[in-house]
Amino acid sequence: MGSPVGLHRVVEPPGVLPQAAWRLDPDPTIRDDEVRVSVHRLNLDAASFRQLREAHGGDGDAVRAQVRQWITERGKMHNPVTGSGGMLIGTVDAVGPASPLGLRAGDQIATLVSLSLTPLAISDDLADWDGRSEQVPCAGHAILFARSAVAVLPDDLDPTLALAVLDVCGAPALTDRLVRQYAAPRPDASIMGFGTGIGADEVPKSMIGRGGGGPAVAVLGAAGKSGALALAAARRAGAAATVGLVPTVAEQRRLTAAGLADAVVLADARDPVATAEAVTGALAGAGADITVVCVDASGCEHGAILATASGGTVIFFGMATSFTAAALGAEGLAADVTMLIGNGFVPGHADHALALLRSEPGARELIEARIRAD
């Protein structure tokens, strides 16, 4: 038996969890509670791919060489600049007799934990990847621990599309949970299987929502995968108003056509004043009760805080978020806001995101268009 969280796979430094480790051991021999996966495709998280593309001036060969080097040296795909990795799809190759994951050999699966903590080895040098897209065709193997999270790929969706959605499935699930808590708080209420609601006597003043109904929700980076699904989740969960913020006119047109937001506004989320003016302008001068940050660039913390009403909540999903900038920025602005880090895991998040994809044609078209562009 191995450590359920993978401590036995940490090579260096000793005493840390796999995500924080510099190097993991991807030995294909599995322990009784492990699973080995034959890897078909990686999906680099958006912040990591953006950093790679910018660092190498869009040179795909250089990007591929860098990713190959990281995987070879570290035994995992872990960008040391962003601290993030991504996820993968593959076929279950071997299952230890004590594995609690419920998988069988031959299952087509997607991992729901970061590549930054997943032991990984490649055997094809990433020869079929041009280094110009987030999705990386590859051959190799990965190891899952007892406490890993996985989803069996659905039969009705293209694996590339499913991978893109499952990579960001934590964002719509947490958005759903929080909007429902704002819209209809009640003691000990189960929120769509995503946890327990807060009691009515615990509700902050901003949780009353607009006119006693649901909250106003603003999504920054709203035309991306996580942003589109977060908007769809917010509306379905009972948001009274939804605002999508995007950086370009082309994205504004696409998001407007998708019909996911009541208002689509244009601003660079890294410009705090422009961001706040755009969001509050769409909400008749008020801030959002919930602001969801789905931008893959750094520097969006202050704009999100300024765009949020007093007593409201900011959810940071972008892996480029700086805790220091968020905490000290809120303090410096005397902003009474709750700030949450979207950790990517909410019970039931995979099924929830896939259900949104199937039932929200606007969100599906945005995501499919993004995949085609890549």
Image (tube, helix red, strand yellow):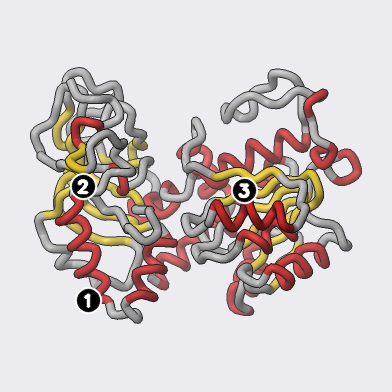
Badge 1 crowding class, 10 Å Cα cut-off, few under 14, some 14 to 19, many 20 or more, is: few
**Residue at horizontal 26 percent and vertical 41 percent from the top:** 108
Say if 172 sits above or below 145 in the image. below
The reply to whether residue 222 is visible in this rendering is no
Figure quadrant of the N terminus: top left
> Which of the numbered marks, if any, corresponds to residue 201?
none
According to the image, label 3 marks what residue? 315
Q: Amino acid at mark 2?
A: Arg
**Nearer mark to the viewer, of 1 and 2:** 2
Relative placement, left or right, of 270 versus 24 is: right
**Residue at horizontal 33 percent and vertical 51 percent from the top:** 159
Q: Nearer the viewer, residue 96 or 114?
A: 114
Q: Position of residue 93 (x, y in %)?
A: 15, 37
Q: Amino acid at mark 1?
A: Asp
Badge 3 crowding class, 10 Å Cα cut-off, few under 14, some 14 to 19, many 20 or more, is: many
Q: Earlier in the sequence, mark 2 or mark 3?
A: 2
- The answer to whether marks 1 and 3 mark residues whose Cβ atoms lie closer than 8 Å is no
Secondary structure of the residue carrying tag 3 is: strand
Q: Position of residue 218 (x, y in %)?
A: 70, 56
> Which of the numbered marks, if any, corresponds to residue 61?
1
According to the image, label 2 marks what residue? 23
Q: Position of residue 358 (x, y in %)?
A: 52, 47
Q: Earlier in the sequence, mark 1 or mark 3?
A: 1
- The answer to whether marks 2 and 3 mark residues whose Cβ atoms lie closer than 8 Å is no
Q: Position of residue 88 (x, y in %)?
A: 30, 49
Q: Amino acid at mark 3?
A: Ile
Q: Earlier in the sequence, mark 1 or mark 2?
A: 2
**Residue at horizontal 47 percent and vertical 55 percent from the top:** 319
Secondary structure of the residue carrying tag 2 is: strand
Would you identify the image quadrant in which residue 260 lies?
A: bottom right
- Outermost residue, right direction? 211
